[in-house]
Image (cartoon, coloured by chain):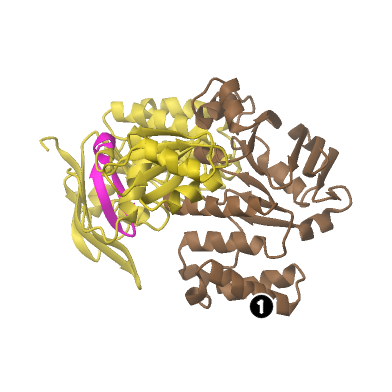
Chain colours: A brown, B yellow
Amino acid sequence: MADAVIHTEKLTKRFGSFTAVDDVSFCVSAGEIFGFLGANGAGKTTVMKMLTGLLSPTSGKASVAGFDVWGEAESIKRNIGYMSQRFSLYDDLTPRENITFFGGIYGLPRSEIREKGERMLERLDLKEAADTKLSALPLGWKQKLAFSVALLHEPSVVFLDEPTGGVDPVTRRRFWDMIYETAAHGVTVFVTTHYMDEAEYCDRVSIMVDGRIAALDTPELLKRTFEADSMNEVFIRLARPAKRSEG
Amino acid sequence: MIMKEAVSAQGITKRFGKVEALREVSLSVACSELFGVIGADGAGKTTMLRILATLLLPDSGKASVLGIDTAAGYRQLRTKIGYMPGRFSLYQDLSVEENLTFFATVFGATVKENYELIHDIYVQLEPFRTRRAGQLSGGMKQKLALCCALVHKPELLLLDEPTTGVDAVSRQEFWQMLQRLKSQGITILVSTPYMDEAVLCDRVAFMQDGRILAIDTPAGITRLFGSPLFAVRATERHRLIQALRSYEHARSAYAFGSSVHYTDRRATARPPELIAWLRSQGFDEVEVEPIEAGIEDTFMALMEEPATKGERGHG
């Protein structure tokens, strides 16, 4: 795929005798919303870590945003956005301070951080809360701020690790509005989720089982292939016979 | 309700500094009922469960569990309930087996005498019985925590978000376990942020911002949905949602699985005019189908109603 923003070929990771990721190959193109699903322990996190430059593969190839995971991990880190439910922003800092901090981490000039930061606070309707410690803000506000901060340095790809955990169904859908908008601007979105209806919102979905990609297609075609009414059914059909007992 | 009550809470209010975690919450759970408390983070679910588990005192209001006052009778009550907190709270440095024995001993029971109750769940843990609890996967930790909450044979189980962060397969298995426990006569009060789990309960309470929005059976809840609802399908989902929201009669438009759920302000809304509007917006192939509201549709509609006063539905 010529315009692949993420490209992996036979990507493999072993920990001792355990093969966490086994010969995984896929491509994600520019502006695509790519859902990355799998049961707990299927190897999702390990793939994410390799693609974000945090972990070296044992063998195989992968490139992200034009950089090779072998040897260019630092460039990958600078050129991607990343947000997870567990780690994104600092709770003891205000929204404005978080923006300044992460802008600095990504090496943006001060004037640009200030200008982009103000626009971001306005767009997210966070002006009034800009100087309130994050810990006092509702989870949904933190999530939309975390997502915007992950895009501050205008990366070509953003990784979202269970971005909508814990929020109410309306807030969850507002978050997806932001994902659609981001993708419409050409940014590639790589997203994991446990909400199976969110799998339906993706352009394509891959499902990992026991370290391998068991299926990869549009939600429509996956449902047709597995003769299922929902992505939940597709997922359960694929993940239930997993051999890798989650010890 | 003629059935005996396992849980009865009236007008429970609890503040933490400026935060009003619970505002006048009342609910009752019948014996042998599987009762779900559904809501997002910060809705007040954990505070409610902790009060019922005798771990917190309400600022006002009264709660009794199994006929015992949670404030005055906490000592007596603690041996009769099993509580599984949202955060993994077993001993990480003890093995699976040691944790189970420890919790049985604390309650003056033995694993052997109550083994029947946990057998179904414990067989899945058995291959790892010498492994430290801290080294287990999420799904296995959750099963062990359930075993430890059950090992003294409680009459009531209080489970705080047992399936959060757990994959769809493990979630399905967990709910099958709950159904089996219910059939053995154990009353279960379980909280969850997953709307799709509501239909697996006998009755549910919807919580938002420390209040109960509604309490009813899953079928009863969906009857609270007041306006016509349509499933709309077209390509370019994001543009479709925006177009629907910009329609002058629109109440809401939200992505739902593979379609978009649209509600109209008028009770008389019909598919043909909606299709005509979408055609005028450049959507060629449009499907519009009137549908029954689900649990999630209803929760969202109730949430968006300004200043819901008290609870609705009936117990």
Q: Callout 1, which amino acid? A: Arg
Position of B78 with respect to A83 (left or right) is left
Position of B291 with respect to B164 (left or right) is left
B252 is higher (above) or lower (below) than A200: below
Task: Please provide percent x and percent y for residue B279.
Answer: 49, 40
Where does the N terminus of chain A fall, quadrant-wise?
A: top right
Q: Residue at x 31, y 54 (%)?
A: B48
Residue A209 visible: no
Q: Residue at x 71, y 46 (%)?
A: A48
Task: Please provide percent x and percent y for residue B223.
Answer: 24, 39
**Viewer-side residue, A49 vs B264:** B264
**Viewer-side residue, B278 vs A68:** B278
Residue A131 visible: yes
For the view shown, which residue lies furthest in the left direction? B2
Task: Please provide percent x and percent y for residue B140.
Answer: 53, 36
B289 in the magenta segment: no
Where does the C terminus of chain A fall, quadrant-wise?
A: top right
B212 in the magenta segment: yes
Q: Which residue is mark 1?
A: A114
**Viewer-side residue, B224 vs A135:** B224
Callout 1 crowding tier (Cα within 10 Å): few <14, some 14–19, many ≥20: some
Q: Residue at x 38, y 42 (%)?
A: B296
Position of A165 with respect to B224 (left or right) is right
For the view shown, which residue lies furthest in the right direction? A71
- Local SS, label 1: helix
Q: Which residues are magenta?
A: B205-221
